[in-house]
Amino acid sequence: MPNIEHVTFKHRDMFWEIAADIYFPPNFDDSRHYPTIVVAHPIGSAKEQTSGEIYSARLAEQGFVTVAFDASFQGESGGEPRSIEDPTRRVEDFRHVADYLVTLPYVDADRIGLIGMCGGGGYAINTVMTERRYKAVATITGANYGRVLRETEGSSAAVIEKLEEIAAQRTAEARGADRQVDMGLPESLEQAAEWGITDVDLLGATEYYKTPRGAKPNGVNVTLRSHMSPAYGWDAFHLAEGLLTQPLLVIVGDIPGAFGAYRDGHEIVRRARSEKKELVVIEGWSHYDLYDKDEPVAQAMAKLTPFFTENL
């Protein structure tokens, strides 16, 4: 088991703290400077799930210091109201994590990398375009959250209707109404079957988050409706042709589902300005298989370790 330190640090522009787990490599020596990798959790997830217990832990075993943190308004991090999923705030979190890391004596400030998973992958891509302290970026089944939301509604007219509903809810809350929290998933695989869900991603998410396989107290998969408007107008890949220049590794499974990571992976590798970029398609596995199943995770690690060794 890796050596882990639980830390909190101030979100410098606000009034709350970010909670994170730092994973240390074997024979860690705090007098040395280590390449460091930040691993961002998926939407609806928490640092104790795949970003921490799987990828941060395994990368630490390969000699990196790794950091899994909870997004603001989620998990053990601060911020009110709870359960906000706002891409602009999620991207800002990465800057504050970097602010903290550059103060640690054992972190090599010139060798900090970033991994994002699922929606966290889209956030990671968007972050590195303007946050140059991250020297290399990888995504694992990364998805463009704004695109996912818009496509889920089905048409531009439906998106406008949804935004009108969000606006009405925000007005109601401003006048004293209760907040409306949207549940992201069925409560069980049995309920998913009752609802007629057959999509591989939605079933995979339900199996991961709603069974002992991946369930954790803070991986709640809920969002506060009144604060969802920014996400519908957001594009993770905007300006990638000009601003995304860091070495880029994109890992996806080849079984596509509703969240569109397979398609998004191909798109961002095509669009990125990065001179060093690679798309890795892991055959026979789907979005949620890459979260924790031994074979696809091992294949992902076989690419992640040399990528960050070479580029940090």
Image: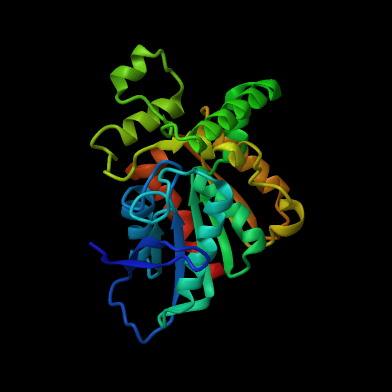
Colour setting: rainbow
**Pick the front one: 88 or 47:** 88
Residue 93 lies left or right of residue 211; in this view the side is right
Q: Residue furthest front?
A: 175
Vertical order, 142 against 169 (above or below): below
**At x 39% / y 54%, what residue is drawn?**
70
**At x 47% / y 44%, what residue is drawn?**
84
Is residue 287 in view?
A: no
- In the rendered image, residue 128, in percent from the top left (x then y), is placed at 61, 60
Q: Count the numbered circles shown.
A: 0
- In the rendered image, residue 297, in percent from the top left (x then y), is placed at 39, 47
Quadrant containing the N terminus is: bottom left
Q: Quadrant of residue 24?
A: bottom left
- In the rendered image, residue 31, in percent from the top left (x then y), is placed at 36, 87
Is residue 191 in view?
A: yes
**At x 39% / y 58%, what residue is drawn?**
68
Vertical order, 13 against 155 (above or below): below
**At x 51% / y 31%, what residue is drawn?**
172
Vertical order, 9 against 48 (above or below): below
Vertical order, 306 against 158 (above or below): below
**Pick the front one: 265 or 6:** 6
- In the rendered image, residue 219, in percent from the top left (x then y), is placed at 34, 42
**Pick the front one: 29 or 229:** 229
Q: Quadrant of residue 196?
A: top left
**Pick the front one: 160 or 130:** 160
Q: Residue furthest bottom?
A: 31
